[in-house]
Image (cartoon, rainbow, N blue to C red):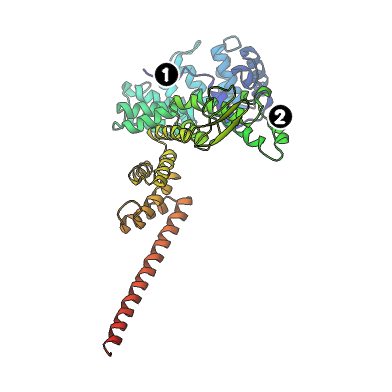
Protein backbone atom coordinates (compact mmCIF):
# COMPACT_ATOMS: atom_id res chain seq x y z
CA UNK A 1 0.00 0.00 0.00
CA UNK A 2 1.41 3.38 -0.98
CA UNK A 3 -0.37 5.40 1.67
CA UNK A 4 -2.73 4.63 4.50
CA UNK A 5 -5.39 7.24 5.16
CA UNK A 6 -5.66 6.83 8.89
CA UNK A 7 -2.12 7.57 10.02
CA UNK A 8 -2.27 11.31 9.55
CA UNK A 9 -1.32 14.27 11.75
CA UNK A 10 -4.18 15.75 13.72
CA UNK A 11 -6.50 16.35 10.82
CA UNK A 12 -8.90 18.71 12.47
CA UNK A 13 -6.14 21.15 13.25
CA UNK A 14 -5.68 21.73 9.53
CA UNK A 15 -9.46 21.68 9.19
CA UNK A 16 -9.53 24.51 11.71
CA UNK A 17 -7.37 26.69 9.50
CA UNK A 18 -9.77 26.28 6.57
CA UNK A 19 -12.73 27.26 8.75
CA UNK A 20 -10.79 30.24 10.15
CA UNK A 21 -12.04 29.64 13.66
CA UNK A 22 -11.59 32.64 15.93
CA UNK A 23 -11.65 30.85 19.26
CA UNK A 24 -8.44 31.88 21.04
CA UNK A 25 -8.07 28.64 23.01
CA UNK A 26 -8.27 26.50 19.89
CA UNK A 27 -5.77 28.78 18.17
CA UNK A 28 -3.28 28.47 21.04
CA UNK A 29 -3.80 24.69 21.13
CA UNK A 30 -3.01 24.46 17.43
CA UNK A 31 0.16 26.51 17.81
CA UNK A 32 1.43 24.47 20.75
CA UNK A 33 0.49 21.08 19.30
CA UNK A 34 2.33 21.70 16.02
CA UNK A 35 4.99 24.09 17.31
CA UNK A 36 4.13 26.74 14.75
CA UNK A 37 3.92 30.55 14.64
CA UNK A 38 6.71 30.99 17.15
CA UNK A 39 5.41 28.46 19.67
CA UNK A 40 7.51 25.59 21.02
CA UNK A 41 5.99 22.20 20.26
CA UNK A 42 4.16 21.11 23.41
CA UNK A 43 1.62 18.28 23.10
CA UNK A 44 0.51 18.52 26.70
CA UNK A 45 0.12 22.29 26.53
CA UNK A 46 -1.86 21.96 23.32
CA UNK A 47 -4.09 19.34 24.90
CA UNK A 48 -4.70 21.55 27.95
CA UNK A 49 -5.89 24.44 25.82
CA UNK A 50 -8.00 22.17 23.61
CA UNK A 51 -9.62 20.64 26.68
CA UNK A 52 -10.57 24.11 27.90
CA UNK A 53 -12.12 24.89 24.52
CA UNK A 54 -14.02 21.60 24.52
CA UNK A 55 -15.29 21.91 28.10
CA UNK A 56 -18.16 24.15 27.01
CA UNK A 57 -19.54 21.26 24.99
CA UNK A 58 -20.69 23.70 22.32
CA UNK A 59 -17.70 23.90 19.98
CA UNK A 60 -17.82 20.97 17.56
CA UNK A 61 -14.32 21.57 16.16
CA UNK A 62 -12.76 21.68 19.64
CA UNK A 63 -14.65 18.54 20.69
CA UNK A 64 -13.52 16.61 17.62
CA UNK A 65 -9.94 17.78 18.08
CA UNK A 66 -9.87 16.85 21.75
CA UNK A 67 -11.48 13.51 20.89
CA UNK A 68 -8.49 12.69 18.68
CA UNK A 69 -6.14 13.64 21.48
CA UNK A 70 -7.93 11.33 23.89
CA UNK A 71 -8.11 8.47 21.39
CA UNK A 72 -4.38 8.61 20.64
CA UNK A 73 -2.94 9.84 23.93
CA UNK A 74 -1.58 13.03 22.38
CA UNK A 75 -0.64 15.13 25.39
CA UNK A 76 -3.17 13.33 27.62
CA UNK A 77 -3.85 9.84 28.98
CA UNK A 78 -5.52 7.54 26.45
CA UNK A 79 -9.29 7.56 26.99
CA UNK A 80 -11.09 5.99 24.04
CA UNK A 81 -14.47 6.01 25.80
CA UNK A 82 -14.07 9.73 26.47
CA UNK A 83 -13.02 10.28 22.86
CA UNK A 84 -16.18 8.57 21.60
CA UNK A 85 -18.28 10.83 23.82
CA UNK A 86 -16.57 13.90 22.37
CA UNK A 87 -17.08 12.66 18.81
CA UNK A 88 -20.76 11.93 19.47
CA UNK A 89 -21.31 15.39 20.94
CA UNK A 90 -19.57 16.93 17.91
CA UNK A 91 -21.99 15.00 15.67
CA UNK A 92 -24.94 16.39 17.66
CA UNK A 93 -23.59 19.89 16.97
CA UNK A 94 -23.46 19.16 13.25
CA UNK A 95 -19.67 18.88 13.05
CA UNK A 96 -18.76 16.35 10.32
CA UNK A 97 -15.46 15.75 12.11
CA UNK A 98 -17.39 13.84 14.75
CA UNK A 99 -18.35 11.22 12.16
CA UNK A 100 -14.76 11.05 10.96
CA UNK A 101 -13.59 10.49 14.55
CA UNK A 102 -16.08 7.68 15.08
CA UNK A 103 -14.96 6.11 11.83
CA UNK A 104 -11.34 6.41 12.93
CA UNK A 105 -12.01 4.64 16.24
CA UNK A 106 -13.94 1.78 14.61
CA UNK A 107 -11.48 1.42 11.73
CA UNK A 108 -8.60 0.75 14.13
CA UNK A 109 -10.62 -0.94 16.87
CA UNK A 110 -9.28 1.30 19.62
CA UNK A 111 -9.82 0.57 23.31
CA UNK A 112 -12.79 -1.69 24.04
CA UNK A 113 -14.31 -1.00 20.61
CA UNK A 114 -14.05 -3.95 18.23
CA UNK A 115 -12.58 -3.26 14.84
CA UNK A 116 -15.42 -2.83 12.35
CA UNK A 117 -14.38 -1.45 8.97
CA UNK A 118 -17.90 -1.74 7.58
CA UNK A 119 -19.18 0.58 10.30
CA UNK A 120 -16.14 2.82 9.86
CA UNK A 121 -16.94 3.17 6.14
CA UNK A 122 -20.53 4.07 6.99
CA UNK A 123 -19.39 6.79 9.40
CA UNK A 124 -16.92 8.17 6.86
CA UNK A 125 -19.67 8.25 4.24
CA UNK A 126 -21.92 10.23 6.56
CA UNK A 127 -19.19 12.84 6.95
CA UNK A 128 -18.43 12.73 3.23
CA UNK A 129 -22.06 13.50 2.42
CA UNK A 130 -21.52 16.94 3.98
CA UNK A 131 -18.42 17.55 1.87
CA UNK A 132 -15.77 16.78 4.48
CA UNK A 133 -12.48 16.49 2.58
CA UNK A 134 -10.82 13.99 4.91
CA UNK A 135 -13.91 11.79 4.95
CA UNK A 136 -14.06 11.85 1.14
CA UNK A 137 -10.42 10.82 1.02
CA UNK A 138 -10.90 8.02 3.56
CA UNK A 139 -13.93 6.65 1.70
CA UNK A 140 -11.92 6.71 -1.52
CA UNK A 141 -9.01 4.83 0.03
CA UNK A 142 -11.27 2.19 1.58
CA UNK A 143 -13.09 1.68 -1.71
CA UNK A 144 -9.78 1.38 -3.54
CA UNK A 145 -8.65 -1.35 -1.14
CA UNK A 146 -12.03 -3.01 -0.79
CA UNK A 147 -12.14 -2.37 2.97
CA UNK A 148 -15.55 -2.38 4.63
CA UNK A 149 -17.30 -3.12 1.34
CA UNK A 150 -19.58 -6.06 0.53
CA UNK A 151 -17.46 -9.19 0.16
CA UNK A 152 -14.36 -6.99 0.27
CA UNK A 153 -14.77 -5.98 -3.39
CA UNK A 154 -12.80 -2.91 -4.41
CA UNK A 155 -14.36 -0.15 -6.52
CA UNK A 156 -11.44 1.83 -7.89
CA UNK A 157 -13.59 3.94 -10.20
CA UNK A 158 -15.70 5.17 -7.29
CA UNK A 159 -12.51 5.61 -5.26
CA UNK A 160 -11.09 7.93 -7.92
CA UNK A 161 -14.30 9.97 -7.89
CA UNK A 162 -13.92 10.44 -4.13
CA UNK A 163 -10.28 11.45 -4.54
CA UNK A 164 -11.37 14.05 -7.10
CA UNK A 165 -13.98 15.41 -4.69
CA UNK A 166 -11.47 15.56 -1.82
CA UNK A 167 -8.85 17.27 -3.99
CA UNK A 168 -11.41 19.87 -5.08
CA UNK A 169 -11.72 20.75 -1.36
CA UNK A 170 -7.98 21.20 -0.94
CA UNK A 171 -6.91 17.73 0.24
CA UNK A 172 -3.42 17.32 -1.19
CA UNK A 173 -3.05 13.64 -0.32
CA UNK A 174 -6.01 13.15 -2.62
CA UNK A 175 -3.93 14.70 -5.42
CA UNK A 176 -1.28 12.11 -4.68
CA UNK A 177 -3.74 9.21 -4.92
CA UNK A 178 -5.21 10.68 -8.10
CA UNK A 179 -1.70 10.77 -9.55
CA UNK A 180 -1.13 7.10 -8.67
CA UNK A 181 -4.57 6.22 -10.05
CA UNK A 182 -3.80 7.74 -13.43
CA UNK A 183 -0.30 6.28 -13.40
CA UNK A 184 -1.36 2.70 -12.68
CA UNK A 185 -4.81 2.87 -14.25
CA UNK A 186 -6.77 2.49 -11.02
CA UNK A 187 -10.34 3.25 -12.02
CA UNK A 188 -9.25 5.20 -15.10
CA UNK A 189 -7.30 4.82 -18.32
CA UNK A 190 -3.55 5.22 -17.86
CA UNK A 191 -2.61 8.84 -18.43
CA UNK A 192 1.04 9.60 -17.77
CA UNK A 193 0.67 13.33 -18.48
CA UNK A 194 -2.05 13.77 -15.85
CA UNK A 195 -0.19 11.55 -13.39
CA UNK A 196 3.01 13.58 -13.71
CA UNK A 197 1.11 16.86 -13.33
CA UNK A 198 -0.66 15.68 -10.17
CA UNK A 199 2.41 14.16 -8.53
CA UNK A 200 4.42 17.26 -9.40
CA UNK A 201 1.75 19.41 -7.75
CA UNK A 202 2.10 17.39 -4.56
CA UNK A 203 5.91 17.46 -4.63
CA UNK A 204 5.92 21.23 -4.94
CA UNK A 205 4.00 21.57 -1.71
CA UNK A 206 7.15 20.51 0.11
CA UNK A 207 9.71 22.77 1.84
CA UNK A 208 10.16 24.85 -1.32
CA UNK A 209 7.02 26.79 -0.51
CA UNK A 210 8.81 28.51 2.36
CA UNK A 211 11.93 29.09 0.27
CA UNK A 212 9.86 30.89 -2.34
CA UNK A 213 8.05 32.97 0.28
CA UNK A 214 11.39 34.03 1.77
CA UNK A 215 12.73 34.93 -1.67
CA UNK A 216 9.65 36.95 -2.51
CA UNK A 217 9.83 38.76 0.85
CA UNK A 218 13.40 39.80 0.09
CA UNK A 219 12.40 40.98 -3.36
CA UNK A 220 9.56 43.05 -1.90
CA UNK A 221 11.99 44.69 0.52
CA UNK A 222 13.97 45.83 -2.53
CA UNK A 223 10.83 47.50 -3.87
CA UNK A 224 10.19 49.15 -0.51
CA UNK A 225 13.76 50.45 -0.32
CA UNK A 226 13.29 52.28 -3.63
CA UNK A 227 9.96 53.78 -2.55
CA UNK A 228 9.67 57.45 -1.58
CA UNK A 229 8.55 56.45 1.90
CA UNK A 230 10.44 53.18 1.86
CA UNK A 231 11.86 53.51 5.37
CA UNK A 232 8.42 53.92 6.93
CA UNK A 233 7.01 51.08 4.85
CA UNK A 234 9.92 48.91 5.89
CA UNK A 235 9.10 49.52 9.56
CA UNK A 236 5.54 48.37 8.86
CA UNK A 237 6.87 45.22 7.19
CA UNK A 238 9.06 44.44 10.20
CA UNK A 239 6.13 44.90 12.54
CA UNK A 240 3.81 42.69 10.51
CA UNK A 241 6.14 39.96 9.26
CA UNK A 242 7.76 37.07 11.05
CA UNK A 243 9.51 35.43 8.10
CA UNK A 244 13.17 34.73 8.61
CA UNK A 245 13.99 36.58 5.39
CA UNK A 246 13.18 39.92 7.03
CA UNK A 247 15.73 40.04 9.83
CA UNK A 248 17.56 43.25 10.68
CA UNK A 249 20.94 42.02 9.50
CA UNK A 250 19.55 41.36 6.02
CA UNK A 251 18.26 44.87 5.48
CA UNK A 252 21.32 46.59 4.09
CA UNK A 253 20.31 47.68 0.62
CA UNK A 254 18.49 46.59 -2.49
CA UNK A 255 21.44 44.78 -4.07
CA UNK A 256 21.95 42.56 -1.04
CA UNK A 257 18.29 41.61 -0.88
CA UNK A 258 18.15 40.84 -4.57
CA UNK A 259 21.20 38.61 -4.30
CA UNK A 260 19.62 36.72 -1.40
CA UNK A 261 16.31 36.48 -3.26
CA UNK A 262 18.14 35.14 -6.32
CA UNK A 263 19.95 32.52 -4.22
CA UNK A 264 16.68 31.28 -2.70
CA UNK A 265 14.96 31.20 -6.08
CA UNK A 266 17.94 29.29 -7.51
CA UNK A 267 17.56 26.65 -4.80
CA UNK A 268 13.93 26.12 -5.70
CA UNK A 269 14.72 26.30 -9.42
CA UNK A 270 17.24 23.47 -9.08
CA UNK A 271 14.48 21.40 -7.51
CA UNK A 272 12.50 21.82 -10.74
CA UNK A 273 10.00 24.43 -9.55
CA UNK A 274 9.06 26.38 -12.67
CA UNK A 275 7.80 29.42 -10.76
CA UNK A 276 11.28 29.82 -9.27
CA UNK A 277 12.86 29.26 -12.69
CA UNK A 278 10.72 32.03 -14.13
CA UNK A 279 11.67 34.34 -11.26
CA UNK A 280 15.39 33.64 -11.67
CA UNK A 281 15.05 34.48 -15.35
CA UNK A 282 13.19 37.69 -14.53
CA UNK A 283 15.81 38.91 -12.06
CA UNK A 284 18.66 38.13 -14.46
CA UNK A 285 17.10 39.46 -17.65
CA UNK A 286 16.06 42.70 -15.94
CA UNK A 287 19.61 43.19 -14.67
CA UNK A 288 18.42 43.37 -11.07
CA UNK A 289 21.18 41.19 -9.57
CA UNK A 290 24.91 41.07 -10.36
CA UNK A 291 25.79 37.80 -11.98
CA UNK A 292 29.22 37.42 -10.42
CA UNK A 293 32.24 39.09 -8.93
CA UNK A 294 35.11 40.25 -11.13
CA UNK A 295 38.66 39.26 -10.46
CA UNK A 296 41.02 41.93 -9.23
CA UNK A 297 38.57 43.71 -6.95
CA UNK A 298 36.91 42.65 -3.73
CA UNK A 299 33.57 44.14 -4.64
CA UNK A 300 33.76 44.45 -8.40
CA UNK A 301 30.69 42.98 -10.01
CA UNK A 302 29.66 42.14 -13.52
CA UNK A 303 26.52 43.73 -14.84
CA UNK A 304 23.85 42.26 -17.03
CA UNK A 305 23.07 42.56 -20.70
CA UNK A 306 26.02 44.85 -21.29
CA UNK A 307 25.44 47.07 -18.25
CA UNK A 308 28.50 48.72 -16.79
CA UNK A 309 28.73 48.68 -13.01
CA UNK A 310 31.09 50.89 -11.00
CA UNK A 311 32.76 49.10 -8.08
CA UNK A 312 34.91 50.62 -5.37
CA UNK A 313 38.59 49.76 -5.71
CA UNK A 314 38.19 48.20 -9.13
CA UNK A 315 37.78 49.13 -12.75
CA UNK A 316 34.45 48.91 -14.53
CA UNK A 317 33.51 45.36 -15.48
CA UNK A 318 31.26 44.42 -18.38
CA UNK A 319 29.43 41.18 -19.11
CA UNK A 320 27.45 41.78 -22.29
CA UNK A 321 24.37 39.61 -22.60
CA UNK A 322 25.64 37.01 -20.15
CA UNK A 323 22.76 37.30 -17.69
CA UNK A 324 20.25 37.35 -20.51
CA UNK A 325 21.53 34.03 -21.82
CA UNK A 326 21.47 32.48 -18.36
CA UNK A 327 17.93 33.79 -17.87
CA UNK A 328 16.83 32.25 -21.14
CA UNK A 329 18.31 28.93 -20.08
CA UNK A 330 16.14 29.02 -16.96
CA UNK A 331 13.11 29.92 -19.07
CA UNK A 332 13.73 26.87 -21.25
CA UNK A 333 13.90 24.71 -18.14
CA UNK A 334 10.60 26.21 -16.99
CA UNK A 335 9.04 25.37 -20.36
CA UNK A 336 10.13 21.76 -19.86
CA UNK A 337 8.23 21.86 -16.54
CA UNK A 338 5.07 23.00 -18.36
CA UNK A 339 5.27 26.78 -17.81
CA UNK A 340 3.20 28.62 -20.41
CA UNK A 341 4.50 31.92 -19.05
CA UNK A 342 8.07 30.93 -19.89
CA UNK A 343 7.04 29.69 -23.34
CA UNK A 344 5.44 33.05 -24.19
CA UNK A 345 8.49 34.92 -22.85
CA UNK A 346 10.84 32.86 -25.03
CA UNK A 347 8.54 33.30 -28.01
CA UNK A 348 8.72 37.08 -27.56
CA UNK A 349 12.51 37.00 -27.14
CA UNK A 350 13.11 34.99 -30.33
CA UNK A 351 10.57 37.05 -32.26
CA UNK A 352 12.39 40.28 -31.40
CA UNK A 353 15.64 38.68 -32.54
CA UNK A 354 14.12 37.68 -35.85
CA UNK A 355 14.40 33.96 -35.12
CA UNK A 356 10.83 33.28 -36.21
CA UNK A 357 11.09 29.49 -36.32
CA UNK A 358 11.96 29.37 -32.60
CA UNK A 359 9.35 32.02 -31.82
CA UNK A 360 6.67 29.99 -33.59
CA UNK A 361 7.75 26.86 -31.72
CA UNK A 362 7.43 28.43 -28.27
CA UNK A 363 4.15 30.19 -29.09
CA UNK A 364 2.72 26.86 -30.26
CA UNK A 365 3.92 25.19 -27.05
CA UNK A 366 2.09 27.82 -24.99
CA UNK A 367 -1.06 27.40 -27.08
CA UNK A 368 -1.00 23.61 -26.70
CA UNK A 369 -0.87 23.90 -22.89
CA UNK A 370 -4.18 25.77 -22.82
CA UNK A 371 -3.35 28.14 -19.96
CA UNK A 372 -6.19 30.68 -19.76
CA UNK A 373 -3.77 33.56 -19.18
CA UNK A 374 -0.84 32.83 -21.49
CA UNK A 375 -2.50 30.80 -24.24
CA UNK A 376 -4.39 33.88 -25.56
CA UNK A 377 -1.17 35.93 -25.57
CA UNK A 378 0.63 33.27 -27.58
CA UNK A 379 -2.33 32.88 -29.95
CA UNK A 380 -2.52 36.62 -30.66
CA UNK A 381 1.25 36.92 -31.20
CA UNK A 382 1.27 33.97 -33.58
CA UNK A 383 -1.89 35.26 -35.25
CA UNK A 384 -0.24 38.60 -36.02
CA UNK A 385 2.75 36.82 -37.50
CA UNK A 386 0.45 34.88 -39.82
CA UNK A 387 -1.69 37.91 -40.64
CA UNK A 388 1.24 40.14 -41.65
CA UNK A 389 3.61 37.50 -42.97
CA UNK A 390 6.08 38.31 -40.20
CA UNK A 391 8.71 35.64 -40.72
CA UNK A 392 6.11 33.17 -41.98
CA UNK A 393 3.90 32.95 -45.02
CA UNK A 394 0.77 35.08 -44.92
CA UNK A 395 -2.11 32.91 -43.76
CA UNK A 396 -5.22 34.97 -43.01
CA UNK A 397 -7.34 31.91 -42.25
CA UNK A 398 -4.90 30.70 -39.60
CA UNK A 399 -4.67 34.20 -38.13
CA UNK A 400 -8.46 34.35 -37.79
CA UNK A 401 -8.50 30.95 -36.11
CA UNK A 402 -5.82 32.00 -33.60
CA UNK A 403 -7.62 35.24 -32.78
CA UNK A 404 -10.87 33.36 -32.23
CA UNK A 405 -8.98 30.89 -30.02
CA UNK A 406 -7.83 33.77 -27.82
CA UNK A 407 -11.32 35.27 -27.77
CA UNK A 408 -12.92 32.02 -26.65
CA UNK A 409 -10.53 31.82 -23.67
CA UNK A 410 -12.48 34.60 -21.96
CA UNK A 411 -11.17 37.33 -19.68
CA UNK A 412 -8.43 39.53 -21.09
CA UNK A 413 -7.96 37.05 -23.92
CA UNK A 414 -11.53 37.64 -25.05
CA UNK A 415 -10.99 41.40 -25.26
CA UNK A 416 -7.62 41.13 -27.01
CA UNK A 417 -8.84 38.43 -29.40
CA UNK A 418 -11.95 40.40 -30.32
CA UNK A 419 -9.86 43.53 -30.90
CA UNK A 420 -7.42 41.62 -33.13
CA UNK A 421 -10.30 40.08 -35.12
CA UNK A 422 -11.94 43.48 -35.55
CA UNK A 423 -8.72 45.17 -36.69
CA UNK A 424 -8.11 42.39 -39.18
CA UNK A 425 -11.64 42.72 -40.60
CA UNK A 426 -11.26 46.50 -40.84
CA UNK A 427 -7.92 46.11 -42.61
CA UNK A 428 -9.42 43.61 -45.05
CA UNK A 429 -12.38 45.94 -45.71
CA UNK A 430 -10.10 48.89 -46.36
CA UNK A 431 -7.94 46.78 -48.65
CA UNK A 432 -11.03 45.60 -50.53
CA UNK A 433 -12.30 49.18 -50.92
CA UNK A 434 -8.91 50.43 -52.09
CA UNK A 435 -8.60 47.57 -54.55
CA UNK A 436 -12.06 48.40 -55.92
CA UNK A 437 -11.20 52.08 -56.15
CA UNK A 438 -7.94 51.31 -57.95
CA UNK A 439 -9.78 49.06 -60.40
CA UNK A 440 -12.42 51.73 -61.07
CA UNK A 441 -9.75 54.40 -61.51
CA UNK A 442 -7.85 52.20 -63.94
CA UNK A 443 -11.02 51.58 -65.97
CA UNK A 444 -11.84 55.30 -66.03
CA UNK A 445 -8.32 56.15 -67.15
CA UNK A 446 -8.52 53.60 -69.97
CA UNK A 447 -11.86 55.05 -71.11
CA UNK A 448 -10.52 58.63 -71.11
CA UNK A 449 -7.41 57.67 -73.04
CA UNK A 450 -9.57 55.95 -75.63
CA UNK A 451 -10.95 59.38 -76.63
CA UNK A 452 -7.54 60.78 -77.47
Q: Is residue 179 left or right of residue 280?
A: left
Percent across and percent down for residue 362 are 37, 42
Q: Quadrant location of the C terminus? A: bottom left
Give the label, 1 or 2, closer to the camera.
2
Which residue, as the protein is rendered here, is positioned at the far bottom?
A: 451
Residue shown at 52% from the left, 38% from the top: 286
Which residue, as the protein is rendered here, is positioned at the far left?
A: 450
Distance of label 1 from label 2 (alpha carbons) = 42 Å
Q: Is residue 1 left or right of residue 239?
A: left
Percent across and percent down for residue 434 are 36, 72
Residue shown at 63% from the left, 16% from the top: 47
Percent across and percent down for residue 57 are 65, 24
Q: Would you identify the image quadrant in which residue 326 lies?
A: top left
Q: Is residue 299 left or right of residue 404?
A: right
At mark 1, the secondary structure is loop
Q: Quadrant location of the N terminus? A: top left
Q: Residue tagged by mark 2?
A: 239
Q: Is residue 268 visible?
A: yes
Residue shown at 30% from the left, 26% from the top: 184
Q: Earlier in the sequence, mark 1 or mark 2?
A: 1
Residue 306 disc label: none
Q: Between residues 148 and 402, which one lies in front from this camera angle? A: 402
Percent across and percent down for residue 427 are 39, 65
Vertical arrangement, residue 363 with respect to residue 420, above or below: above
Q: Between residues 277 and 313, which one lies in front from this camera angle? A: 313
Q: Residue tagged by mark 1?
A: 4
Which residue, as the protein is rendered here, is positioned at the far front?
A: 315
Q: Between residues 103 and 239, which one lies in front from this camera angle? A: 239
Amino acid sequence: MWYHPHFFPLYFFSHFFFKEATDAQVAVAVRKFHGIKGATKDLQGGADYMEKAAQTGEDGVALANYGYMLANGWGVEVDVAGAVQKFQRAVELGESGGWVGLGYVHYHGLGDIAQNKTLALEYYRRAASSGDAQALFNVGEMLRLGEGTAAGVADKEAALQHFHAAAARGHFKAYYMMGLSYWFGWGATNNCADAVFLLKTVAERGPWGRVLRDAYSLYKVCILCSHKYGFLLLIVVFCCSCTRALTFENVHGKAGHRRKALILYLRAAEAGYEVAQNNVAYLLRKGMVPLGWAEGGASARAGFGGERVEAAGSEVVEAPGCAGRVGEAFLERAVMQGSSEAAVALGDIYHRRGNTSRAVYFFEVAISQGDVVYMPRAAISLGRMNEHGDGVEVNKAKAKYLYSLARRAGGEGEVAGLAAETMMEVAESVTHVMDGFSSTLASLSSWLFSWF
